[in-house]
Amino acid sequence: MPEDPYVELRAFLDRFPLGFPPTPSGVELKILKRLFTPEEASLAVKLSARPEGVEEIAERTGMAPGALEPILDAMARKGLVFKMRRQGKACYNAAPFMILSNESTPSLPRFTGNTMTAHMPTKWVPVTYRASK
């Protein structure tokens, strides 16, 4: 049975210097489920920390470049991955969680006032802070 894409994504994000550790409540998985579809979560863990072209990512994922690029573009618009242009080509790379949630996620304000926003300071941030000490 394949692993839950959100558990896999949490572990992937935790490898970044900013981390994304598990919490006793599992609130980090609720946050990821609000931000990523299962397909996006499965794709995000296959991205590199360095920018890569669609063809390179497609080779690693087994997806056709024509099917992959619209998904990556949608993820970039949501702030879930970084997108840049190099020599006229679109390049994408993985984004650490705190950067994605604080600086580049235009969709985050729509979560204001819901349970995700309420849980972040009380259940996720204290665990993350303790884990980084």
Image (cartoon, rainbow, N blue to C red):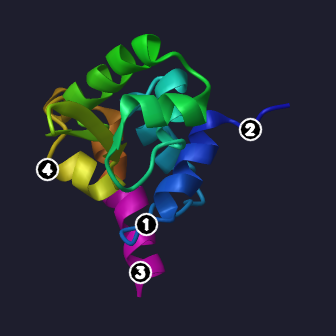
Find the distance from the CA under tag 3 to the CA under tag 1.
Answer: 8 Å
Measuring from the top left, give residue 79's x and y in whole percent. Answer: 23, 36
Is residue 7 found left or right of 29 in the rendered image? right
* Tag 3: amino acid: Ser
**Comes first in the chain, label 4 or label 2:** 2
Which mark is nearer the camera, 3 or 2? Answer: 2
- CA gap, disc 4 to disc 2? 29 Å
Give the Cα separation between the discs numbered 3 and 2. Answer: 26 Å
Q: Which mark is residue 85?
A: none
Circle 4 is placed at which residue position?
A: 103
Look at the image and tell me in which quarter the N terminus lies: top right
- Judging by the rendered image, the residue that carries numbered circle 3 is 132
Q: Residue furthest top?
A: 66
Q: CA distance from mark 1 to mark 4?
A: 16 Å
Label 3 vs label 4: CA separation?
20 Å
- Label drawn at residue 19: 1
Structural distance between the alpha carbons of marks 2 and 1: 20 Å
Q: Identify the amino acid type marked 4.
A: Glu
Which kind of residue does numbered mark 1 sit on? Gly
Q: Secondary structure at mark 1?
A: loop
**Which quarter of the rendering shows the C terminus?**
bottom left
Looking at the image, is 15 positioned above or below residue 85?
Answer: below
Give the crowd class for mark 1: few <14, some 14-19, many >=20 residues within 10 Å.
some
In which quarter of the view is residue 128 placed? bottom left
The image shows residue 115 at horizontal and vertical percentages of 35, 36
Q: Amino acid at mark 2?
A: Glu
| Residue contact between numbered discs 3 and 1, judged by CB atoms under 8 Å | yes
Discs 1, 4 touching: Cβ within 8 Å: no
Q: Which residues are magenta?
A: 121-133
